[in-house]
Image (cartoon, rainbow, N blue to C red):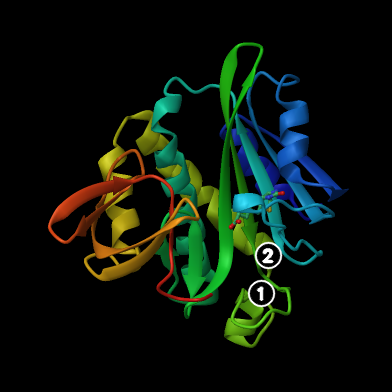
Amino acid sequence: MIYKNIQHQLKKNNFIFKNFKVLDSTMEKTKELIDSYKSNFLVLSDEQTKGKGRRGNIWYSPSGNIYISLGFKNLIDIKNHFIFNAATVLSISESIDSICNLNSNIKWPNDILVNGKKISGVIVELIKSNNMNYIILGVGINVEKSPNILNYPTTCTKELNSKINKIEILELFLKNFFNYLDYIYKHQYKYILDKFKKKLLYLNKKIYLEENNISFLEGKFIDINLDGSMVININGVIKNLYSARILNDNY
Ligand code: BTN
């Protein structure tokens, strides 16, 4: 079975593994299953017919790429959900770098870019069921296929000019992720945030932003808070932004 090592890794970390050939979206399946399990679980699908991106976008999901969602059931501390996001994005970026020998970066808050083009994205949803709060993380990594849109995503295969084994990326992603999870469980959030910042594009640089699809802002990107908000200096006034889009590049 091709996912044998993944199954083993998940079991060791008390995660249940659910594997599908086709789903509408692993996010929707995870929500559907959230009440069925006592432990955390991972849903993987070889392809998706209604892949979901952030801001209501569609996530193009033919077979050949990675599509997973992680459902967290046993969280004590949901208020620090950004750190789960940071650990996920970092784990993806590090596994792509190591397996594909590339140098990926993070674009705040959830994108992984290679040579200025998006190779992977993460979506985080907080849901309430039976009066409990759960975190669901969705990960899409373009290994082989990307939509044919100018300046839009790239793939590991495209960047390398040779085929990459998606199972290897997935295995390393999980290894990295479980390692960061230990830091989260020990509340060592700064360790993760510092690593996140090292890969962050535009930190200490001038950025152009669109806030809530309305206002246009220009300032210096000076830091990231533990809650995930970005700190920017706009003409000497320090502002924390929770929801904005960096417009510096047009990936
Ligand atoms: C983004 O817009 O950058 C986030 C993309 C997240 C896509 C993944 S693919 C697996 C999971 N299932 C979905 O429907 N979406 C996420």
Left or right? Give the position of 87 relative to 28. Answer: left
Q: Any mark on residue 166, and which?
A: 2
- 240 vs 227, nearest the viewer: 240
Q: Inspect the image, locate mark 1, and give the three-letter code of the amino acid beneath it.
A: Ile
The x, y position of residue 17, in whole percent, is 72, 37
- 166 vs 81, nearest the viewer: 81
Vertical placement of residue 35 versus 241, above or below: above
The residue shown at (41%, 27%) is: 79
Left or right? Give the position of 152 relative to 16. Answer: left
Q: What residue sits right under mark 1 in the picture?
A: 164
The residue shown at (47%, 50%) is: 212
Q: Inspect the image, locate mark 2, and give the three-letter code of the amino acid beneath it.
A: Lys
The residue shown at (56%, 52%) is: 122
Indicate the quadrant where residue 130 lies: top right
**Does the residue tagged 1 have its C-beta within 8 Å of any atom of ligand 1?**
no
Vertical placement of residue 207 versus 20, above or below: below
Vertical placement of residue 6 versus 38, above or below: below
